[in-house]
Amino acid sequence: PLVKNKHNDFIVAFNKLDYDKNSFITFDDIRSALPEFTSRFDKEIICGLFRILDIDHDNDRLSYFDFVTSVIVLQECKFNMKMQTISN
């Protein structure tokens, strides 16, 4: 299966990023939880990423649904890239 993570792993990761524990991941959460990440990119780039990953379009914040769906899609893309490399 493409998704090797257990449901609990998603919850743990989401909760680590949801710094203020309001059930959404926001730019401020990322800035607090991952300061080394946000110091490398300006706010507009990170907010742009949020707009892309915010599947249900609720004010540039990631719900648990957005988070899990994005991880699954990214894993599938990575898997497909590996398969293309192997077949070439």
Image (tube, grey):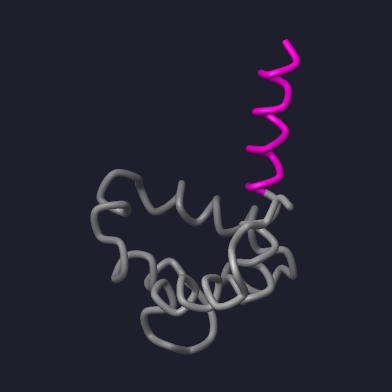
Position of residue 75 in the picture relative to residue 14 (left or right) = right
Which quadrant does the C terminus fall into?
A: top right
Is 6 or 78 nearer to us in this picture? 6
Residue visible at 49% across and 74% down in the picture: 14
Residue visible at 71% across and 68% down in the picture: 57
Position of residue 86 in the picture relative to residue 6 (left or right) = right
The outermost residue toward the top is 88
Q: What main secondary structure does the magenta stretch of the protein show?
A: helix
For the record, the magenta segment spans 74-88
Q: Position of residue 82 (x, y in %)?
A: 65, 28
Q: Is residue 11 highlighted in magenta?
A: no
Residue 5 position (above or below residue 23): above
Position of residue 76 in the picture relative to residue 25 (left or right) = right
Position of residue 50 in the picture relative to residue 85 (left or right) = left
Residue visible at 53% across and 86% down in the picture: 23
Quarter-wise, where is residue 15 in the image?
A: bottom left
Q: Position of residue 4 (x, y in %)?
A: 62, 57
